Structure formats: C-alpha cells, structure tokens
Amino acid sequence: MPKHDPMDRTSGFLKKDLETLPPKKRIEYLNLKLRGIIQYAYKHSIAVKNKLDSVGLTPKDIQTIKDLEKIPITKKTELMELQKKNPPFGGFEALPITELRRIYISPGPIFEPGEADYDELGWAQGMVAAGVRPGDMAINTFSYHMVPFALQMIDNSLHRIGCITIPAGIGNTEQQVNILKTLKANVYCGTASFLLNIAEKAEEMGLDLKKDINLKVGLVATEMLPESLRSKLEQKFEMIIRQSYGTADIGCLGYECLKKNGMHVPDDKIVEIVDPSTGKQVGPGKAGEIVATTFNKVYPLIRFGTGDLSLLTETPCPCGRISPRLVKILGRVDQATKVRGLFIHPGQADEVASKHPQISKVQVIVTRKEHKDEMTFQVELKEEVSQPEKLMSEIEQSIRDVMKVRGGVQFVLKGAIPAGANKIEDRRTWE
Ligand SMILES: [Zn+2]
C-alpha cells in the first residue's frame, strides 16, 4: 500500500481516446498508420527501400499487420552490418543527419539517431499508467552517457508529462540517498536492483525509508524484474513499482499498468510475436520472438527483430486500455527450444519450479519417441514428501499452465542433475 499521497494515481491515461479505442477501431488505426509509415520509409530510407525491393515488394503490398509477414525481419546483427557498411545508421534514417540533435552509441557499437523533437509515446504512456503525474519530481538514475535511454527517452518523457527531473545517472549511491532525502523526489526511474542498493544504503545511514524518503512511484526497466524483488521494494518504500520494456533502437514496446498483468504495447508501435525460423506470426498465447515496427519518421525501423522471446495476450485489461499485452519477457530467442511446435524457455522451467517450494532443482529433458517430442521435468526435491503422486500431478499441471505443453515429471536423487547443467537439455536426434 503506498504511503499517504494527496495525488490520485489510480486511474489516468496519456492519450485516453487513443488508448481506449474499441479493438476493431484500434486495428483500423494501426493499419492506417502502417500504410503511412511504409510509404514514407520506402521513399525516405534507403535501407527500407532496399529491404522491400529485395523481395519484390512495393509499399502497396503492405496494407495490414498480417501483410508485414512478407517483409524479412531485420535482426540486430544485420543492423550492425549495415551500419558498418553505411555509417552511422545503415541507411535506416529518413532524414539528413544534419537535422538530428544527437547521435547515441549503444554497445556493439550500434548508433541511434536522437531527433530534435522527440515524440515517442510509449515511455510516457507507461509513466502515466504507473501513476506518474504532472508536477511530480523524478530522480532519473539510468545512465546519461552515450546511450539514448536516460536522456532521450526517459528525460523527454518526464518533461512531456510535466515532471521535474533530477538527472542523477547511475552510481554514487550515498549521494543519491542524500538527494532523495533533501529534494523529496517522489518518482524513481532506474533499475530495480539499483533501487535496492539505494534502500540498503539508506538503511545503513540510519534513515527510515517510509518517512525520510518520499518515493511513491518507481518506473523500472532494462533488466528482468522478479516478483520477489518488486514486492520487497514496494513494501520497503511503500511505493508502486511498475516495469517497462523496450530497446535502444526502437524505444518502448511494453509497459505495465496498475493491474500488473502484462505490458501494454504502446499505440505508436506494432508488435508481432513470430516464429523466428519462419518470420510468421504465431497468434496470441504462443511464445515467439518480439518483432517491432515503429511509426517514427526519423528512424522508421520496420520489422525489427529484438531477439527477445515473449507472448501476447488480447484478453481485456480492467484498466480500460485496449492494446494487447506482452505477458512477460521469457528470455532470449537463442536459448529457446521448440517442443511440439511451441517454444519453451529456461525461464519457464524456473517459473514452474518457483510454484512448488518443495523443489530444489529442475532440468528439462527433451527427447523424441516415434516421431513425437517428449518433455520430462527431472526434479530434485529438498526433502522427501509424503504424497509424491499428488505433488507430481501438481507439477504437471503447472507445466501445462506455464508452458502450454504437456510434460512428465520424474523425481531424481539429490545430486543427479549435474552442477552447471543446461536448464533444458535437448536429446532429440533427427535420423
Ligand atoms: Zn491495463
């Protein structure tokens, strides 16, 4: 429960009309924006033109989100190659670079353009959905150097909402605590793990996190957020913690609302979940690679492959936002394995294990019998249980719930799963 706060943070939208469009209208809106950006990018971005030309497409071939499947996905490695050949942006930019305000550099190196008039919706939508309001004071502890996130994306989005920003950057934990105490900032932007550092440092300095620190809303990003860490921070500070997801190249691709049931896709992006081997859309509820298309006219990335694995849900969200939600980020595509046509990921195995406190260790074994995939969870228990059959069927149920694939359970002796073993071991042979 948040500490006493005169501000109503329970409802509110950045762009209510757009965010609450009926589903059919929303699709029409996105298709219209898609046709616009494809035409624009084909004309102004040499890389996008080359991509469409390479498979014999013209802008009129792309009328709907489904048509996007015809365009090959641009992976990060390809973007890097193109940037090397044609620096700095590989020809994806759609304006002369003299019109930019900044050039950002992410590890790789990968260059990202910083436009003069930043108008991306996603991060600001996420801030409002999390409870950030005009007049709030935010401490921004993401790194301001080189990369676009803190300066371009977060700083500009806070300004758009009408917040005051303290550009604190990362590190100097003790100084950050003193800033929070003196200026009474009520919004935190940064990683969840750094907020935990701040909490520990403040406690070490003898401060009361609920009285001496005024934080009410935290917007975290750039790393996985375990629920245990979220609830720990929410309780310690009596604040709301919500996460967002995106990449430096394309910006925000998902943000949590107060209902905390997945990350809404912003209204200025199209997010597809695709089978990474075919590029085809897999539909709601199925895991695949997050592939994104932006309506940004400065850097119109079309079908950019993030390399992250997730699934979308279209079930209505009680917050009133209509956009689908990324249920969670499961991990990287290159760590995933396909079982009976569905992707499974080490993170899902951990999630199954976390639902049963009796489990100390799991390993998923994938085999093939009579041309059918079989998946078995080998499970080490902390100690013997009185009703192993009952636990076994409960774990099997969790496997179905989490992975959407049936799997068997086999209890093994302590130490049977080797230290450092792969979480998922693929023993299939394809003879
Ligand atoms: Zn919602």
Image (cartoon, rainbow, N blue to C red):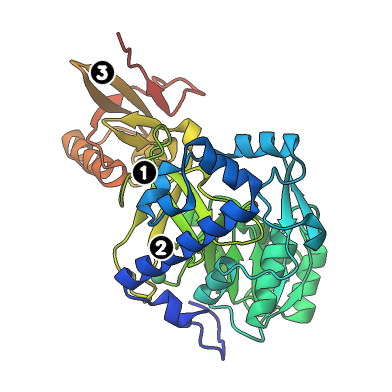
- Residue behind mark 3: 368
- Residue behind mark 2: 31
Separation of disc 3 and disc 2 at Cα?
A: 42 Å
- Residue behind mark 1: 287
- Residue 117, how many percent across, how many down? 71, 71
Q: Amino acid at mark 2?
A: Asn
Q: Is residue 307 visible?
A: yes
Bin the neighbour count of mark 2 within 10 Å (Cα to Cα): few under 14, some 14-19, many 20 and up: some
- Residue 327, how many percent across, how many down? 39, 55
Question: Depth check: 363 or 108 in front?
Answer: 108
Look at discs 1 and 3 and give the one toward the viewer.
1
* Mark 1 / mark 2, whichever is N-terminal: 2
Q: Is residue 158 above or below residue 226?
A: below
Q: Residue at x 59, y 83 (%)?
A: 133
Q: Residue at x 52, y 43 (%)?
A: 52
- Residue 162, how many percent across, how many down? 67, 83
Q: Amino acid at mark 1?
A: Ala
Q: Identify the residue at the far top of this view.
A: 431
Label 2: element kind: helix
Label 1: element kind: loop
Bin the neighbour count of mark 3 within 10 Å (Cα to Cα): few under 14, some 14-19, many 20 and up: some
